[in-house]
Image (tube, helix red, strand yellow):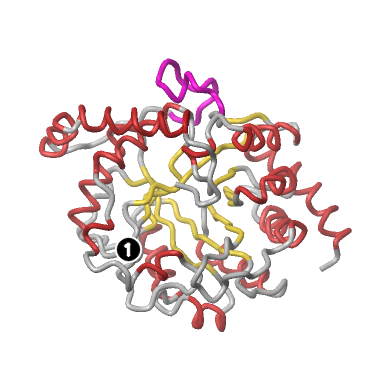
Amino acid sequence: MDSVATLENSIKAFKLTEKYHGDAVSLERALFLGWYCSLNDPCKFCFMSTQKQKIKEPLRARRRIESILAESIIMKRIGWKLEFISGGYGYTTEELNDTIEMVSYVQGSKQYLNVGIIDFENINLENIEGVVGAVETVNEKLHKEICPGKPIDKTKEMLIHAKDNGLKTGITIILGLGESEKDIETLLNMIEELELDRITFYSLNPQKETIFEGSASITTLEYMNWISSVRLNFPKVKIATGTWVDKLTNIGPLIMAGSNVITKFPLFSLYGKKEGKTVENEIYSTGRNLYGSFSDIDALKGLKLAKNTKYVDEKISISSKNLDAVERMKKDVDKKIEGYIKKALKTPFSDFGE
C-alpha cells in the first residue's frame, strides 16, 4: 500500500462525500434481537460462535420485545438512526414481521434488515427500507474458511431479489480477517454488480475464544485505503464505518477518507462520558457537523429531541394486534427506558460493553 497515495485519495474522497452527502455525519447502531446464532457453522470471528455450545435454551438468549422497543425509542430521542435490525438468525418470518412493525411504529421510521436470507414471499415489505447482506469478506478462500454458513452466492441472490422488490440494499464487510489490498477490486466489482446503496465496514474486534483472539487490528491507513477506494469509485454510496472504544481516534481519519456514518459502540456505557464526547470531538475535528448526540443528557431523558436528526416521520403500517401489544407494554417499556438511562448516568465505562 502506498501511504502517500492513500492520504491523497482520502482528500479527494472527503470532498466527494461533502458533495453527495452534505456536511454532516450520522451516528448509527445495530439493533440486536438476541445473542444466539442458529447457523450450524457460525462465523469464526463472532462472539456468538463462542456462546453457541454454552446456551442450552436458545429462546432464553433472545431479547424481550420491551427491551427492543425501549432501545428503539431512546435511539430516536438522541438522533441516532438504527443501522439495521439484526440477530443471530433462526427467527421465523412471523416473528420478524411483528418486530419490524413495532420497532418501525415507535420510531416512525422504516427499517433495514440484516437477518440472513429473507423469505420475500412472506415478509411484510411495507415497513422495510432495505436489506443488508452479511458478506463479511469478499476474499473467496477466506470466506469459505471463516463464514461457511453464509454462502456469498445466496446472499447475492437475496440482494438482487430485494432490488426487484424496490428495496435498498447493502452489505457488511469486516476488515482484519486476513484480506489483502488486492481484495478491494473484488469489493468494487461486487458493489457495481449488485448496485448497492450502502456498505458498512467494521474493524475486527478480536473476541476471546475465537481463532482471532490476540490478533492485531487493521491499521488506520489500511482502513482509510478501503474507505477512500469505495468513495472515489461510488460517490453516492452510503459508507458506514465501525470502530471500537480503544480506537476512537480512528474516527476523524475514517471521515476524512469518505465515511459519512459512524457505528459500532456500546451506547449506554459511553453516553455522556468522555468516550462519547471524544466521538463527537473526532467528528467535529474534521469540520463536519453531527446528526444526533453522544452527550446530551436532556435528549437521553426525553426532555427534548436532539438538535440535529435524520429522522423524518414516515407512515407506518401496523396491525391492530401489534398496536394493542405496544399499548399493553407501555409501562414495561417505560421502565426499561428508565433502566437504560440510569445505566448511562451511573455505570462507569467498561471495556466489556453492554
Residue pictured at 16% horizontal, 38% vertical: 322
Q: Over which residues does the magenta segment extend? A: 295-311
Q: Where is residue 200 in the image (x, y as percent from the top left)?
A: 55, 55
Query: Residue at (85%, 61%) from the top-left corner?
Result: 3
Looking at the image, how many numbered discs can be counted on the residues? 1
Q: Vertically, is 28 above or below 38?
A: above
Question: Which residue is more in the foreground, 217 or 346?
Answer: 346
Is 257 drawn above or below residue 219 in the view shown? above
How many residues crowd around disc 1 within 10 Å: few (fewer than 14), some, or many (20 or more)? Answer: many
Q: In the displayed structure, does residue 188 sit left or right of residue 149? A: right
Horizontal and vertical percent for residue 219?
A: 74, 61
Q: Which amino acid does label 1 sit on?
A: Tyr
Q: In what element is the residue under mark 1?
A: loop
- The residue that disc 1 covers is 36
Which secondary structure class fits the magenta region best? loop
* Residue, far top: 303
Residue 76, compared with residue 153, is above or below; it is above
Q: Which residue is drawn at 58% across and 49% down?
A: 240
Residue 91 percent location from the top left of the image: 24, 60
